[in-house]
Amino acid sequence: MIKIAHISDTHITQDPAFKSYAYDLIVNEVNRGNFDLVIHTGDVTNQGLKEEYEHASYLLRKIKKPLIVLPGNHDARNVGYELFEKYIGPLYGVYERDDLVIIWVDSTIPDLSDGRVGGYKFRWLKEKLEEYSHKKFKIVAAHHHLVPLPDTGRERNVLYNAGDVLDLLLRHEVNLYLCGHKHVPNVYSIEDLTVVNAGCTSCRKTRKGDVNSYNIIKLNGDGKIDVTIRRVTGDELKKSYKSVKPKIFIPKGKHLLRMVQMSESNVSDRIYFRKRVLENAIRAVNEKYKPDLVIHCGNIVDVGIERYYEMAAEYYEKIKVEKIIVPGHNDITYLGYDLFREYFGEPEIKEFGGFVFIPLLTAQYETPIGVVGRMGQKLLHSRLEEYKEKFTAIVMHHNIIPIPRSRELGFLEDAGNILKILTEERTELVMTGHGGNAFGVRIERTPIINAGSISWELHRNPFGNSFNLIDIYEDMIVAFEIQATWGSRKLLGIWKIKTEVLWKN
Amino acid sequence: MVITMERNAPIKVYMTKKLIGVSPEDTIQEACKIMVKFDIGSLVVVEDDRVIGFFTKSDIIRRVIVPGLPYTTPVKEIMTRDLITTDANTPVREVLKIMAHHRIKHILIEEEGKIVGIFTLSDLLEATRRKLETSISTE
């Protein structure tokens, strides 16, 4: 067993922003505990200043365990990244011990709060992952968080290329991603990857009246990972994860429902709208895939004008099965807000036997940035409670997990809170349609599937225009991506359903 | 067009990690229905959460259709028992050599003595198409 203390965001400075008593308290606990090593995921200093680094270098020496320290955005302020190397240590590195490897990378951008792991860093990380592929426990650490966090206000500072980094870590079967940045302690499992955010160890800026904290991570010989968020008050929150291998699916359960999920038709007379591709796809949906339900996750028209809505209505009239269409930000531009409702109706909750589909409106007028809002969150929460006994599926436009190849700007302001509500309520399925690339992962118990663009040339999908085919069996959910022109398919994800609920009957 | 791919990446990066399987007693017809439904060219045969056999569409042609076996034959009678496998950390270039050497289009991937994945020519196509790169910026 290897035991790691994960601290972060110490924000060491002479200003009152730094709480030295919290720092000493946590360091004493760490020194007394039987930890094998300590990792600090950045924002060692408050402004990256020389006197702060001098102070930090003295304070970090109080930690009497092997110590890994990463730079955070505050450390990179005022060209502090150069001082970091002088006073603290390397900006990138590898730590190896028995079955464990820790690879840390500098995700900062000088003078900005945002993060990125651009080409050189990304390739370096990839090479290290290849080199240490054989290690049983692979940990990657960077300052910036990978998936939206709850209670962070305006969720804007994720890694610009969080989707690419997530894809890299998942493919390399990395066990843990450790980060800090937002001062919110949190743990999520994404497929077999455990993403651990540390709260802040000694900064005054905690959120929602929270106190300082650090994380305790245990890597057990059987592969189980235990994470404890330990607050200075002594309160503890524990979570455990263990990946199951092999992942074998024996399709024996009854088939219950078939859906086609699409997004970004962007019907228009612009050259980027691929009319033929949409016609082919609609024909294939009607004649080949024959779903029970078609879901369109936003941007049915390119801009909200009557002529485009007329065209879109004509295309989608051809699909005879039940449809759930939610508006994306393109749909409500100009007069689109009213036109959407005129042509496609107000998105409403739809029930099919044991299934319930809940539309979640996120689009804002003439901006790609979406929001659910505090009232919307409460409403979502109560809806999920109300339909607890059913298979609940959420249909929305904005993605709540980062999508590979898209530039992550935090397109949904409160994505962190939405993700928290959906995962805590164990929502059975979430379908989104933003970013122009298909992607599917399970976070905690909730599969989240994003649809690429069905007929818009401006997409980010190496597979081309596509839509998703989702089959729900009584014991599993299977999602395929279907190439919209050729009809070739590939598996996006397959997840077991373990809960014993009424909707199965 | 230049087709490039990451030949040094361990095969686990490009393998399919979620295996679709049948039980040894399942009939060939049931197995074929699953192959069609999931659009896949091979299936693992599973007993007590372990892979004990494997067969492909061409095995069905050679071992069922040509000899004229009934569709109700259980898959255990036609499956391959001596599996060709490679470790999950084997670099892609080595795996391609093994596949070429054995003239196979599907290879099972092993980790700590268990079959944990499969790599097929479709995965190879996907690997050439979906490179692990980022275009966000150089830095």
Image (spheres, helix red, strand yellow):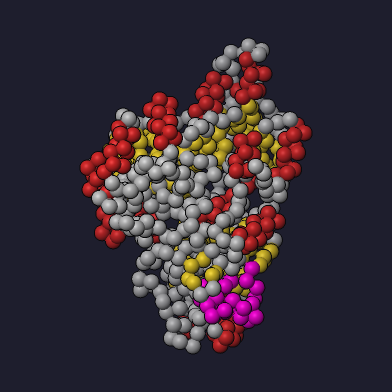
Left or right of B13 in this view: B30: left
Point out residue A199 in the picture as x, y percentages from the top left corner.
46, 70
Q: Residue at x 65, y 23 (%)?
A: B58
Q: Residue at x 70, y 37 (%)?
A: B85
| In the image, residue A115 above or below residue B5 | below
Point out residue A8 in the picture as x, y percentages from the top left corner.
52, 72
Q: Residue at x 64, y 19 (%)?
A: B61
In the image, residue A76 lies in the stretch drawn in magenta: yes
Point out residue A504 in the picture as x, y percentages from the top left corner.
36, 35
Relative depth, front residue between A228 and A190: A190
| In the image, residue A423 above or below residue A254 | below
Q: Which residues are magenta?
A: A70-92
Left or right of B28 in this view: A185: left
Residue lying at the far top of the rendered structure: B68
Q: Residue at x 62, y 43 (%)?
A: B127
Relative depth, front residue between A299 and B16: A299
Say whether residue A255 is visible.
Answer: no
Say whether residue A408 is visible.
Answer: yes
Residue lying at the far right of the rendered structure: B101
Left or right of B30 in this view: A503: left
Quarter of the image with the C terminus of chain A in it: top left
In the image, residue A214 lies in the stretch drawn in magenta: no
| In the image, residue A320 above or below residue A333 | above
Relative depth, front residue between A182 and A464: A464
